[in-house]
Image: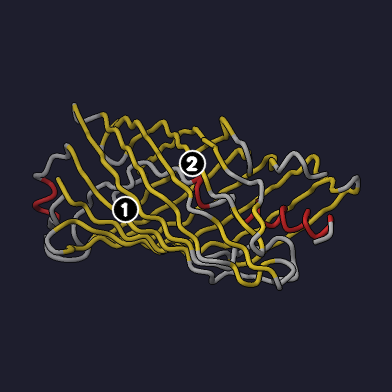
């Protein structure tokens, strides 16, 4: 493989691997009544540097991402336990700049990114409840599990270095525990791992890229001003994820973490605004982004009270 091909493959791999492990999702195992529904529109802006293998002649790698996401949430009973499913369809666009082998390179990409579906069920402390039962319930300790699936449905051209899609399946299994006390404080702790299938049409279309699993830990401390009005401090850490291209190991083992904050503000009975900010605190390989996001949600409950 030539030096130029090696560099462009590295760029493609770093950008493709940035998104999954960086999630910060406070109150992800929150119980809602059976029949709860929500439509969410969100926007995220990410801006920052991308750290590469120091041995490669890549300097000043910068990226700016914009992402708009349409999501739908539905809560239901799963063998008597509270469960929910969320589907998300993102559209992404971004500008990328790097000095590669002393030459400045610019890229712009836009298009549909990969769809995501998350299924979660509470194993302890969260029975399926009607609205009437839910109003008499007091949250204490909840134990839940979830499975997130990212499907390769987005725009992908194997002849391009960077694409909105990563052109492979990704799966995240997770165990989460949440404890609420004094009615106003909640602590969420999650542990999980991402698993990936190969990309058999990796740049320039004839390569095969594999990636090892990524272990992820996440924590959130939340303060409730009143129901549906809360703020949280967020943090995560992820490690591993070394990749191979055509059987050749890449120097892209990740050991990264982020911190941030989130606030949700109810507008009325059905509508809520959500704002968040996060940034990297330690990035070994990958994107050291500042992330600002805003979202609007409309929720309703359908079914017996």
Give the x, y percent position of residue 203: 71, 66
Determine whether, in the image, residue 45 is placed left or right of residue 259: right
Q: Secondary structure at mark 1?
A: loop
Quadrant housing the C terminus: bottom left
- The residue drawn where x is 46% and y is 33% is 261
Determine whether, in the image, residue 208 is placed left or right of residue 143: right
Disc number lying in front (1 or 2): 2
Q: Secondary structure at mark 2?
A: strand
- The residue drawn where x is 78% and y is 45% is 56
Determine whether, in the image, residue 272 is placed left or right of residue 186: right
Quadrant housing the N terminus: bottom right
**First along the sequence among labels 1 and 2:** 2
Give the x, y percent position of residue 29: 28, 47
Mark 1 burial class by Cα count in 10 Å: few <14, some 14-19, many 20+: few
Q: In the rendered image, which quarter is residue 219 located in?
A: top left
For this orientation, the residue located farthest to the right is 102
Q: Camera-side residue: 92 or 205?
A: 205
Determine whether, in the image, residue 56 is placed left or right of residue 223: right
Q: Residue 238, labelled with which disc?
A: 2
Give the x, y percent position of residue 296: 44, 51
Give the x, y percent position of residue 193: 41, 50
- Residue receiving disc 1: 270
Q: Say above or below: 203 vs 21.
A: below
Between the C-alphas of marks 1 and 2, the distance is: 35 Å
């Amino acid at each position: 493989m030539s030096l130029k091909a090696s560099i462009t493959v590295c760029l493609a791999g770093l950008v493709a691997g940035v998104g999954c492990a960086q999630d910060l999702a406070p109150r992800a195992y929150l119980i809602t009544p059976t029949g709860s529904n929500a439509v969410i529109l969100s926007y995220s802006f990410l801006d920052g540097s991308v750290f590469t293998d120091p041995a490669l002649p890549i300097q000043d790698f910068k990226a700016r991402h914009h992402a708009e996401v349409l999501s739908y949430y539905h809560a239901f009973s799963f063998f008597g336990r509270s469960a929910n499913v969320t589907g998300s369809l993102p559209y992404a666009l971004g500008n990328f700049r790097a000095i590669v082998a002393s030459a400045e390179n610019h890229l712009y990409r836009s298009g549909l990114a990969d769809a995501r579906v998350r299924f979660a069920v509470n194993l302890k402390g969260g029975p399926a409840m009607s609205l009437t039962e839910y109003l008499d319930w007091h949250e204490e300790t909840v134990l839940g599990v979830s499975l997130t699936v990212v499907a390769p449905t987005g725009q992908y051209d194997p002849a391009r270095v960077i694409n909105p899609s990563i052109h492979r399946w990704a799966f995240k299994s997770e165990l989460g525990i949440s404890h609420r006390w004094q009615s106003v404080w909640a602590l969420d702790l999650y542990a999980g791992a991402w698993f990936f299938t190969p990309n058999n049409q990796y740049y320039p279309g004839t390569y095969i890229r594999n990636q090892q699993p990524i272990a992820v830990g996440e924590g959130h401390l939340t303060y409730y001003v009143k129901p549906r009005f809360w703020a949280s401090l967020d943090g995560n850490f992820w490690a591993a994820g070394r990749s191979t291209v055509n059987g050749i190991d890449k120097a892209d083992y990740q050991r990264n973490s982020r911190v941030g904050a989130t606030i949700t503000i109810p507008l009325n009975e059905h509508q809520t605004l959500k704002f968040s900010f996060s940034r990297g605190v330690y990035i070994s390989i990958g994107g050291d982004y500042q992330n600002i996001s805003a979202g609007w949600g409309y929720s309703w409950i359908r079914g017996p009270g």
